Image (cartoon, coloured by chain):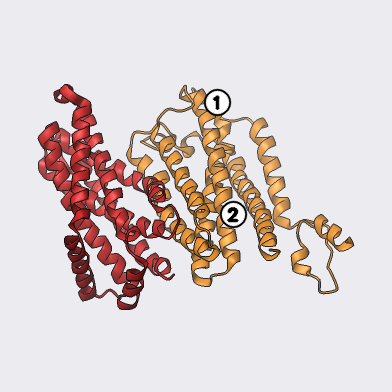
Amino acid sequence: MQFLTFSFLTFGEANKTGCSGNPKITLIMKWWKILGIVLLAYTIIAGFLVPAPRLDITNETIRNQYFHVPMWFAMMIILLVSVIYSIKYLRSNKAEHDFIAVESANVGILFGILGITTGMLWAQYTWGAFWNNDPKQTCAAIGLLVYFAYIVLRNSIEEEQTRARISAVYNIFAFPVLIALLYVIPRYTDSLHPGNGGNPGFNMYDLDSKMRMIFYPAIIGWTLLGVWVMEMRYKLRKFEFYNN
Amino acid sequence: MVNLREIAALVKKEALLEWRQRYALNGMMLYVGSTVFICYLSFGIKTKQLVPATWNALFWIILLFTAVNAIAKSFIQERQGRNLYMYQLASPQGIILSKILYNSLLMALLSFIGYTFYTLVLGNPIEDQGLFIINLLLGAFGFSTTLTMVSGIASKAANSSTLMTILSIPVLVPMLLILIKISKNAIDGLERSLVIDEVVILMSVNMMLIAVSYLLFPYLWRS
């Protein structure tokens, strides 16, 4: 019982120590989790307080750069992890790989929804409406549909190994399409979105490189947060799997 | 490795099976025909006022749903016993490539039938017929590469016909957007060099999907 209490305090480190008789109890979190918290705290404080370039139309909404854009970066990184673990699953057939793949996809969906919401808020103040039928918005929404379809596919297969294999196949198959949707199509159409359709992107606004000082840590911070959520859900899933 | 003779034999087998049970083929043709006719009826007397953009969008929507319905059967309707038999006879790579090839041919045929009938009842505002027909072939090829694999995936799950639509539509959207753009160009009769980029993207997306299908299908097949 005492062991359980301690393992709870160590944020799930107990797996490594196991019941081998000498549980190494450390009360500190893993370094990257602390880094994630620090970076996000920095992002939020500096993102709202440090002066940002003042431009027409965008005004203060340029601060969305620290929230909206990193969400999509984090989503892409985490979905890439999902695809890599799907490939690993097909090669190894280990249930753990499938768990990581599905939980990464779930966190990716969460970031996608947050990204599209922050984007809509920004659009309201700069383009004049939450939904503008902009190609980038439409493509992002369709990209999310791909992953909703992935979840539906998973739910419609009963047998665990078949479910893992078939959904891994679909995950890998759909990923190139997501890339095409988010990074190829909007570049070839008339989009209002910064960086697309001939609009100036991030580099243009970045007058004195000050924004980069917050933007890059923000990407790392949000990604680490996503990995953290994914790891916890993965451990829960694994726990349920081995206790049934 | 890819065995060309094997693929040829498999394509021939598909065509033979299709020909022996003609109801499926006839059914698909009837599907195209009746959808076009419904569009005609719903526009009623105002057919002459149909804007080219609407004409274009309607045509591709008809083709999209025809493709989903026609190609869905390539795995979903196959019986379990026959799959087992094929599993012992042919390599998975041979099977997926032959299915893609056969479905492309089938889709090309259906698109031409659809195109002819559509032109007949709803008129034809296209300036550059050549480009439109090239685009039609590209579309047939693209739809079949995507849908063949998705049909294989959906066939493994319960409720596969609904799943087929859910899984394929988001995957098909980028392709559909490019196709509509190229055919808009053909309708307006603009310079062909303007859409070279789009054609290249379409071809590369197709190639990528074929490569991914080729690599992934063995895992799908193994059950």
Quadrant where the N terminus of chain B lies? bottom left
Position in image of residue B125 (x %, y %)? 13, 32
Residue A54 is marked as: 1
Q: Which mark is residue B25?
A: none
Q: Position of residue B84 (x, y in %)?
A: 36, 73
Q: Is residue B51 above or below residue A37?
A: above
In the image, taking residue B81 as reference, residue A229 lies left or right, namely right
Residue B184 is left or right of residue A85, and the answer is left
- Look at mark 2 in the image and give the residue it sits on: A103
Q: Amino acid at mark 1?
A: Arg
Question: What residue appears at the point 58 percent right and 42 percent down from the top-left corner?
Answer: A215
- Where residue A148 appears, x then y in whole percent? 49, 46
State the hue of chain B.
Answer: red
Image location (x, y in percent) of residue B129 = 11, 41
- Output the letter for the chain in orange: A
**Front-most of residues B188 and A230:** A230
Tag 2 near tag 1, CB within 8 Å: no
Q: Residue at x 50, y 34 (%)?
A: A205
